Amino acid sequence: MQYRRLGRSGLRVSTLSLGSWVTYHNQVDTGQAREMLAAAFDAGVNFFDNAEAYAGGRSEEIMGAAFKQLAWPRLNYIVSTKFFWGLDREGDAVNRKDTLNRKYLMQAMDGSLKRMGLDHIDLIYCHRPDPHTPVEETVCAMSDLITQGKALYWGTSEWSAADIRAAWEIAERHHLHKPVMEQPQYHLFHRRRVEQEYARLYEDIGLGLTTWSPLASGLLTGKYKNGVPEGSRGALENMAFLRDGLTHPAKNQAVAKLEPIAADLGCSLAQLALAWVAKNPRVSTVITGASHIEQLQANLGALAVLDKLTPEVMGQIDTLCVPLAD
């Protein structure tokens, strides 16, 4: 395993990490989670991503139960969660959902700690921007969670560059804990934000990236070329919103044209797509997902592809994918 610093922080995260979105509770129970966490950890993965909203809090419960059974030294692994959407099972109170106000953040933090059975969470994120809460309030609350020892670093997910810079400058001005990382979607067909919009932030404030959806929810595995297969992520009823993107004709044609490139490199399409994301030096870690152990082990094989991505190969990939990227 390779390790990279999370932005300008001193924290080192594995180049490939393991996330729980979609899979935990929907496809993976505590026993399966424990098995995959153990396999990932044995391969050198040290970062495990979660969020309050994943499976209505049950994803955190499953991961927390697995951690308890594994009994790893707490210093040896990094875990995250994200706040914004709240939990549907706790109702629709006005200060419970779609917010980053101080009341919600303080109580959301305590809820995540309880569900995961931890005394602190390493990385916490504002899962989306909140246009209705002053950013000063959000920054102060996130900073206070770190001061209280409930979290170690904070960051954002899917925030604009302007909003990230505004939050960082408020923290700088008031001597608060600054946002360290952003969690954006990044893959061959979704590139503008990481490659263009955030470009100044890497040098100016030392922004680190923990990117999600490297396989475009499975599109880049090639499994959706002929429709939505039974048992796939796209076949899940609660993932129906993904189907139009997964069956996009032009993108699936491009994926088919990537197959010979992957074959020449001796890897799968998924490994090629994962390695392409990891090739970007601005990416601190690539969050992968898996619903079974074989898929996890195959994903970890992407590390062996990194050195094969020469400028010539990267150019071939860009020729196919850039025209369809946003």
Image (spheres, rainbow, N blue to C red):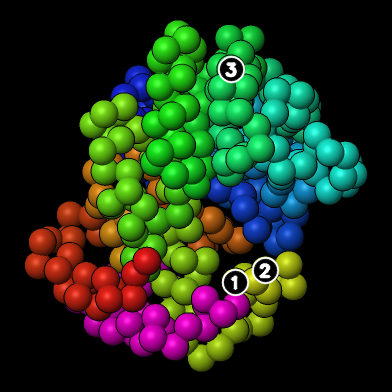
Query: In the rendered structure, which segment of residues is drawn in magenta?
Result: 243-271
Residue 87: percent from the left, percent from the top? 80, 44
User: What secondary structure is found at the residue carrying circle 1?
Assistant: helix
Q: CA distance from mark 2 to mark 1?
A: 6 Å
Q: Which residue is mark 3?
A: 140
Out of 190 and 22, give the one closest to the viewer.
190
Q: Residue furthest left?
A: 312
The residue under label 1 is which amino acid type?
Leu
Give the residue displayed 56% in from the left and 88% down from the top. 227
Q: Which residue is mark 1?
A: 242
Give the residue displayed 28% in from the left and 84% down from the top. 257
Are discs 2 and 1 less than 8 Å apart at CB? yes
Label 2 Cα neighbours within 10 Å, binned few <14 / some 14-19 / many ≥20: few
Q: Main secondary structure of the magenta part?
A: helix
Give the residue displayed 36% in from the left and 22% down from the top. 9
Give the residue displayed 28% in from the left and 51% down from the top. 196
Q: Earlier in the sequence, mark 3 or mark 1?
A: 3
Are discs 3 and 2 less than 8 Å apart at CB? no
Q: Earlier in the sequence, mark 3 or mark 2?
A: 3
Residue 320: percent from the left, percent from the top? 25, 78
Label 1 Cα neighbours within 10 Å, binned few <14 / some 14-19 / many ≥20: some
Q: Which mark is in front, 3 or 1?
A: 3
Q: Which residue is mark 2?
A: 239
Res. 192 image quadrant: bottom left
The residue under label 3 is which amino acid type?
Cys
The residue under label 2 is which amino acid type?
Met
Image height check: is 120 above or below 319?
above
User: What secondary structure is found at the residue carrying circle 3?
Assistant: helix
Q: Is residue 43 visible?
A: no
Res. 233 image quadrant: bottom right
